[in-house]
Image (tube, helix red, strand yellow):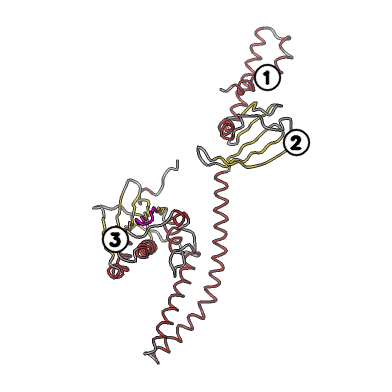
Amino acid sequence: MSQWDRETHMSIFYDKVADRICKLDADGLRRQYKALADEIGFYESVFDSLDEGIVVLDGAGKVRYANAAGRELVPLLGLDEEPLPGGNAKADGISVKEMEITYPEHRIVEVKRIGNVIKLRDVTEKRAQDADAIESGRADAVGEMAASMAHEIGNPLNALSLNLQLLKRRYPQENDLSIAQRELERLNGIIREFLGAFRPARARLAPGFAADSLKDALAALKNVFEDRRIGVAIDLPRTMPMVAIDRAQMEQVFFNLMKNALEAMKDGGSLMIEIKVDDTSVSVIFRDSGAGMSDKTLARLFEPYRTTKKRGTGLGLMISKRIVAAHGGEIQVSSEAGKGTTFTVRLPRLEKRVRELT
């Protein structure tokens, strides 16, 4: 127990003892002392059970008392190093501010001072949740706009596509009509991607194998890999546990990740695909020999509209992350400029869907 803790405990009951000490005999004094000590212990246990830190300053602005949560935060905030200004603040004087701690771990602490009493509250998690809520609100707003735009643009595009098909039948030699048709199909693809990003379909999870979705995605890209002179090596375990999976949605995830690898290897290269199994999860790993990414690009990789491609929307990886999250999994990425990129999709094993958080 620190020096200021002991001083606080003693000062709380000394005044109560002083006016009674002359009236009590030795036994009475011991009983009174024990009762007061028990009272101190009770209130101390109550204050120590609080999540918020409670700190009391003396008239000089020095820490006089702190509960358990306060004792943890006081040295981190430097409140024990020098007196706080305004130690003689009025009892009704209130000030609130937030302080950021960067070492030994990042924390944000709300410091509320009422006179000589300071309440400390760790708001790190709340601030992170607030930031997520703001981002989610932005995504919802953009989603509504995207859906409206898709509806307004989609109907004219469909009509135009039908007319182009009729024109192609009449004038099959016109190459410009084929180009226009391809561009229309590209625009329709972008619209579908927008809707998929901001209004994703609910994952229909069922027992299955990640390797099945991988096989489907590989079949769709087999000819492209051969055309680009990209060698694909696959390493699968002999036995593979089941996962709760939406086969079609996970195929989309694997397709997006392999398409990213293709874009990173313009002049050929190699893609290593490996499935690893541990006690709790099944990991599908994509390791390419492409150009890699800078730390700056890596930091914002899963944000919408962030893309290094000339004709990309930047939504593929964001969609993939949402799908994997809906499966109770996670996507991790590591990359080094000039050496390639590794994506890891980790899915919980079917029999390990519940885990204890630490």
Q: Residue furthest front?
A: 338
Q: Residue furthest left?
A: 238
> Could you classify mark 2 by the number of other residues whose Cα lies within 10 Å: few (under 14), some (14-19), or many (20 or more)?
few
The circle drawn on residue 13 is 1
Residue under pointer 2: 92
Specify whether 142 is left or right of 169.
Answer: right
Residue 19: horizontal and vertical position, in percent? 74, 14
Q: Earlier in the sequence, mark 2 or mark 1?
A: 1
Q: Nearer the viewer, residue 290 or 93?
A: 290
Magenta span: helix, strand or loop, mainly?
strand
Residue 16: horizontal and vertical position, in percent? 71, 18
Check the image and report above or below for 113 versus 233.
above
Residue 21: in magenta span: no
- The local secondary structure at tag 1 comes to helix
Quadrant where the C terminus is found in the figure: top left
Write the residue at 68% across / 29% down: 61
Which amino acid type is marked by label 1?
Answer: Phe
Write the residue at 57% across / 59% down: 137
Alpha carbon separation for disc pair 3 and 1: 76 Å
- The local secondary structure at tag 2 comes to loop
> Could you classify mark 3 by the number of other residues whose Cα lies within 10 Å: few (under 14), some (14-19), or many (20 or more)?
some
Q: Which of marks 3 and 2 is nearer the N terminus?
A: 2
The circle drawn on residue 326 is none
Q: Is residue 190 visible?
A: yes
Q: Quadrant of residue 262?
A: bottom left
Residue under pointer 3: 270
Quadrant where the N terminus is found in the figure: top right
> Could you classify mark 1 by the number of other residues whose Cα lies within 10 Å: few (under 14), some (14-19), or many (20 or more)?
some
What is the span of residues highlighted in magenta in the rendered image?
333-342
Q: Earlier in the sequence, mark 3 or mark 1?
A: 1
